[in-house]
């Protein structure tokens, strides 16, 4: 049975047995779980869809850039097209290109089947609609160009196509212009949804946006300019006799055959979409017969959903606020949840989920799961961790919300002893200025001793020691050293300000607390929550009441191996709760240096004793 996070983080007690090594019956906590075949297939399909989309987008980009050359001249367009055709008709390139087009189309239908609901995000609506419309709008162009060349050898170039669009059928020309824009927009949306989670995307976004707008604009202008040129040339009979013969346009029989082929392709595509929708209905009916699960949220809202939905899909379907920056594609991890009950009935994380958990630092916390990857089979009580309105900042950089974990730390709370008195005795110094200098001095002392500043509270602050999971005795000694150095730093600050001594109080307590991000919306910060934090703050009140500068619990002194009698100890009563606690009340912070010296002397004496024992003859 795996240890709980709290047990795993507590320091070992003297004489306690060492934890057993992982065995075949009890695997290590971070041993990777084997991904299911379905999960591996889904991950592979997403990768194929992404890379096939990139290939198609590259083809569309080449097409648009070629159109943009129409702003130079029609001859430049034709010359560039001749070079591109040599590349596209290469057998290897053609195989990759047409394979990518077919794969992207097929996987788009698979994604339509896999989507559990149509409550789409703002960016997903145009992406889905354009993806469904593009094959219908493009099929005629593909048939009369590429398929016509493959079947009958008719090699149409820009001249013939522009004549068709600008002279014979302007409606087709309008359709072609719309197709150009829609294909580019569809690709740009896909790239945006993929790249926005990259660290470099934000600084590069203005340049990418400029390119996204500039390329189709220049392409449409080139299409317009070259179309006007061809429309003017079409008025000359000799030009028509040279460029609009059956060798360039095909015979009437060939055109009729191509029209039948186009209608057949449209019917087949319509049938495929209908088959996908019927498959969705069959799946939904089967899942309803398979039973339902109940999901309970922090506000005690409970929803009942069919088995097979992911946690994120269930939240979205029933309009429960739930973050999901990548739209449930398993990329960002912002949909992660803390499972309060029912975690044992959830399927094991697959490779995609394990990778996300490792990236966000939650791979060793079994109750943290990724909402878009988990499909519960039993009732679950969960808490979404990331704020519902989270943006991409929560998926990269410093805005990752760290999940709560139990960890042993030493908490040091320091604050001005009496703000009102200090303000009166500051000889005109501004209170905020004095408080800021005080906190600067305290933070410098804490970090110099090996601690970490955590948060401000009024005219005080909380510092934590032992976040790295090191030796508890070392963390306790670091906290004592910080308390002594705070006294030195505050005295030095008072001399620099030229005023009266600045009073301060320090409270130190150790224990297992919950570490994680706390806050709302954009105001989220890493902090510690637990009894040890409250006790450290209460000990400051005890120090103020006793007229002392430092109050440290006996548990901290014992772990730091402070010799008995080095610091005055006794029982104190915590304000508010009235709970008694054994603590050392130190009137002057400099007295802590004496305790640290006593620790060093005791350690030296013990080392000398052991050395002498080894030197004695047997």
Image: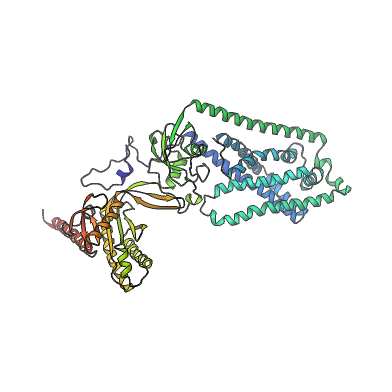
Picture layout, residue 571 above or below residue 442? above
Left/right placement of residue 199 relative to residue 466 reads: right
Horizontal and vertical percent for residue 289? 50, 25
Q: How many marks are shown on the rendered structure?
A: 0
Horizontal and vertical percent for residue 200? 53, 55
Res. 32 image quadrant: top left
Who is closer to the viewer here, 435 or 59? 435
Q: Residue furthest bottom?
A: 498
Who is closer to the viewer here, 335 or 192? 335
**Picture colour scheme:** rainbow
Q: The N terminus appears in which quarter of the rendering? A: top left
Q: Residue furthest right?
A: 237
Q: Residue at x 41, y 49 (%)?
A: 402
- Asked if residue 307 shows in the view, the reply is no
- Asked if residue 548 shows in the view, the reply is yes
Res. 294 image quadrant: top left
Left/right placement of residue 443 relative to residue 563 reads: right
Horizontal and vertical percent for residue 563? 17, 57
Who is closer to the viewer here, 523 or 287? 523
Picture layout, residue 443 above or below residue 79? below
Q: Residue furthest top?
A: 289
Horizontal and vertical percent for residue 35? 45, 37
């Amino acid at each position: 049975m795996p240890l709980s996070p709290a047990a795993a983080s507590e320091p070992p007690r003297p004489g306690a047995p060492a934890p057993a090594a992982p065995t075949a019956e009890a695997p290590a906590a971070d041993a990777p779980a084997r991904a299911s075949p379905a999960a591996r297939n889904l991950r592979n399909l997403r990768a194929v869809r992404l890379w096939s989309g990139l290939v198609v987008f590259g083809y569309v980009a080449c097409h648009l850039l070629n159109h943009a050359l129409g702003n130079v001249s029609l001859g430049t367009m034709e010359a560039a097209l001749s070079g591109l055709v040599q590349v596209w008709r290469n057998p290897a390139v053609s195989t990759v290109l047409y394979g990518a087009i077919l794969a992207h189309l097929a996987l788009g239908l698979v994604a339509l089947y896999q989507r559990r609901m149509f409550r789409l995000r703002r960016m997903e609506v145009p992406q889905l609609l354009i993806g469904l419309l593009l094959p219908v709008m493009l099929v005629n162009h593909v048939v009369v160009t590429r398929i016509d060349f493959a079947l009958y050898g008719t090699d149409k170039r820009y001249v013939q196509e522009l004549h068709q669009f600008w002279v014979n059928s302007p409606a087709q020309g309008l359709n072609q212009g719309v197709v150009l824009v829609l294909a580019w927009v569809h690709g740009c949306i896909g790239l945006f949804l993929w790249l926005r989670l990259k660290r470099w995307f934000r600084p590069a976004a203005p340049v990418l946006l400029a390119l996204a707008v500039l390329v189709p604009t220049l392409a449409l202008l080139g299409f317009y300019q070259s179309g006007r040129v061809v429309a003017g040339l079409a008025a000359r009979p000799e030009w028509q006799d040279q460029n609009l013969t059956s060798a360039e346009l095909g015979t009437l029989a060939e055109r009729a055959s191509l029209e039948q082929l186009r209608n057949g392709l449209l019917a087949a595509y319509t049938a495929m979409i209908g088959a996908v929708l019927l498959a969705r209905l069959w799946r939904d009916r089967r899942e309803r017969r398979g039973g339902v699960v109940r999901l309970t949220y922090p506000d005690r809202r409970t929803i009942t959903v069919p088995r097979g939905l992911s946690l994120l899909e269930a939240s979205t379907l029933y309009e429960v606020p739930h973050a999901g920056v990548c739209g449930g594609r398993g990329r960002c991890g912002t949909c992660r949840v803390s499972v309060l009950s029912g975690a044992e009935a959830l399927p094991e994380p697959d490779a995609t989920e394990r990778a996300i958990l490792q990236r966000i630092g939650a791979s060793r916390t079994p109750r943290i799961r990724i909402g878009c990857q988990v499909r519960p089979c039993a009732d679950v009580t969960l808490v979404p961790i990331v704020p519902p309105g989270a943006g991409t900042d929560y998926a990269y950089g410093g805005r990752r919300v760290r999940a709560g974990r139990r960890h042993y730390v030493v908490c040091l709370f320091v604050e001005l002893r009496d703000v009102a008195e200090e303000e009166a005795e500051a000889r005109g110094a501004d209170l905020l200025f004095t408080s800021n200098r005080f906190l600067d001095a305290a933070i410098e002392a804490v970090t110099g001793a090996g601690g970490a500043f955590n948060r401000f509270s009024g005219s005080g602050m909380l510092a934590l020691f032992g976040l790295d999971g090191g030796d508890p005795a070392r963390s306790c000694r670091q906290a004592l050293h910080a308390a002594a150095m705070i006294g030195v730093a505050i005295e030095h600050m008072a001399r620099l300000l030229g005023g009266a001594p600045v009073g301060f109080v320090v409270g130190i307590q150790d224990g297992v607390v919950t570490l994680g991000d706390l806050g709302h919306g954009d105001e989220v910060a890493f902090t510690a929550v637990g009894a040890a934090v409250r006790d450290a703050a209460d000990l400051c009140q005890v120090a103020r009441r006793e007229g002392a500068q430092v109050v440290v619990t006996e548990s901290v002194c014992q772990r730091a191996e402070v010799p008995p009698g080095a610091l005055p100890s006794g029982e104190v009563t915590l304000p508010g709760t009235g709970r008694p606690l054994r603590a050392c009340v130190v009137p002057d912070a400099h007295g802590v240096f004496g305790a640290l010296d006593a620790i060093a002397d005791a350690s030296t004496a013990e080392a000398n004793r052991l050395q002498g024992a080894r030197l004695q003859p047997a």
